[in-house]
Image (spheres, rainbow, N blue to C red):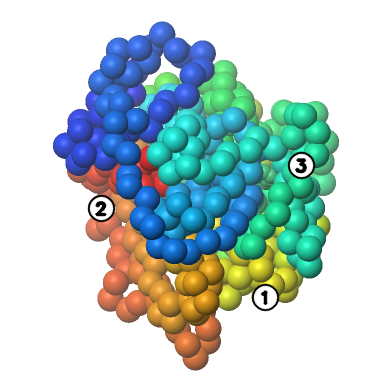
Amino acid sequence: MTLHRRQFLSRLAAYCAAAGIPAFALADDDHEHEHDEDRRREPDSTTSQPALPETGLTGRVVVVGGGMAGAAVAKFLRLWGGTGVQVTLVEREPRYTSNILSNLVLTNSVQMSDLAFDYARLASAYGIAVIRGEATAADPVAKKLTVATASGPQVLDYDRLVVAPGIDFAYPEGLQTPEAQALVPHAWKAGPQTTLLRDQIRAMPIGGTFVMTVPPTPYRCPPGPYERACVVADWVKRNKPGSKVIVLDANAAITAERESFTRAFEVTHGGVIDYVPNAPVTFVDTAAKTIHTPMGPFRGDVLNVIPTNVGPRLLADIGVANAARGFAGVDVLSYESTAVAGIHVIGDASATTQPKAGHIGNQEGKVCADAILRLLGGGTPDPSPVTNSSCYSPITWETASWLTAVFAYDPATRTMKVVPGATGEALAATKDHFEDMFVWFRTLMGDTFA
Ligand SMILES: Cc1cc2nc3c(=O)[nH]c(=O)nc-3n(C[C@H](O)[C@H](O)[C@H](O)COP(=O)(O)OP(=O)(O)OC[C@H]3O[C@@H](n4cnc5c(N)ncnc54)[C@H](O)[C@@H]3O)c2cc1C
């Protein structure tokens, strides 16, 4: 166990105890023994039992995807809607692995098990029926969802369907087979790909080259790729002296926290990071370990290609993929699809003016839950929703920067617009911000899963 990880967990536990926020259950993994002591410090997540209100509302809501957006909408439908609102959560994985903070797994500051959240609390405290399975089809007229489970197909009836399946990838030429993807990981959905990339970085030769790509916007977590470049650069400086980090950006310039990352690339990690804009991936030659772009070929010892983000296939299969790149157009007052009535799409899968981010996914889950409850009661959605987004980006092993924005509904354009004066970013990457990052993470994940 690293000092970082121990600090991380004890900070989480201390904050949790001080704030009275119930803890989430850390899931098991290979590092089980390391967790025993830390686990004892975790308060029992089952001790606080929220009283669900009797609102008189009734209805059946099925949610697909138990990530940042799906878990949040499921929880708040029950917390605000009460016992008459039946909520079923369909999720293909046994537990959720947070993408947030997963860049720190690459440098061993955080372990995968620190990022794992199970669904036990959503089931036990909020009475959400959790079904492990893959949603495959929906009949919007009969209002039925088909789910493939280990024991065969199940058909679920719903009054409202909420779809929150995250993103998928459009792989470039050369990376379209599972074999190629196992050689050049994306690590943009936290899980085995993250540990694969971590192991490749660890095995990189001293003086080696790490080449990574930034996909064209919109993609999940706008600052995330630049943050990755920083933490990997910081790690190689200490562990693989003389190494380089090459960042090939499909976009014309850094897409988020431009000042902070320019300073980080040119000053903090000057001489280590080479930033190349206007460099979309045209071909990946896995044998020659080379990424081809209009700016030239780039050879590396470790390649990390984050492919173009697209809407998951399910969106097209159920008829809601009516925005660019197969994402779903929605009415942001309710997140109801603009293509199919009765189906709501939240999180990264929806096409809005807000960033594809976990914090916003949580916010969209709440706005959507509120709108569905009003609709079930025969009313109309809140006409003026407000959401906010925050992102912390580690720049070194002990400093971080941050970015925040508030969005409000604009009736003229029917979009969420940034509220002037309510947007900001850190003036500098500091140790305090690094510590605050764990408090923010803990609060967000507690609000979503606990
Ligand atoms: C390295 C990295 C760092 C990040 N850092 C931040 C950050 O600092 N702040 C921030 O706000 N965001 C951050 N993000 C972005 C954030 O993780 C995503 O925006 C967020 O997870 C989106 O939430 P979601 O619910 O839409 O999708 P997800 O969280 O991906 O959840 C989707 C869920 O749906 C399930 N699913 C998909 N299809 C089906 C199906 N057919 N049937 C059943 N289940 C299905 C999946 O298994 C998954 O559990 C980061 C992302 C990365 C990659």
Residue 82: image location, x then y, percent? 42, 55
Expressed as whole percent of the image width and height from the top left, the position of residue 431 reads 22, 40
Q: Quadrant of the N terminus?
A: top left
The tag earlier along the polypeptide, 2 or 1, is 1
**Amino acid on which the number 1 mark rests in the picture:** Thr
Instruction: Pick out the residue farthest to the top.
Output: 33
Image location (x, y in percent) of residue 194: 57, 31
Q: Is residue 118 left or right of residue 261?
A: right
Judged by depth in the image, the label closer to the viewer, 3 or 1, is 3
Q: Residues within 10 Å of mark 3 (few under 14, many from 20)?
A: some
Q: CA distance from mark 3 to mark 1?
A: 27 Å
Between 104 and 388, the one lying in front of the other is 388
Q: Which residue is mark 1?
A: 338
Q: Specify few, some or many for label 2: CA neighbours under 10 Å numbering under 14, 14-19, or 20 or more.
A: some
Closer to the N terminus: mark 3 or mark 1?
3
| Left/right of residue 210 with respect to residue 51 in the rendered view | right
Name the residue rendered at 37%, 50% in the picture.
52
Say what amino acid the circle numbered 2 marks. Answer: Ala
How packed is label 1: few (under 14 Cα within 10 Å), some, or many (20 or more)?
A: some
| Mark carried by residue 153 | none
Q: Which dot marks residue 428? A: 2
Along the line of sight, the residue nearer the viewer: 98 or 317: 317
Q: Residue furthest left?
A: 18
Label 3, ligand 1: CB separation under 8 Å: no
> Judging from the image, what secondary structure is the residue with disc 1 in?
loop
Name of the residue lying farthest toward the bottom:
412
**Label 3 element class:** strand
**Res. 239 image quadrant:** top left
Q: Which residue is mark 3?
A: 154
Query: Which tag is nearer the camera, tag 3 or tag 2?
Result: 3
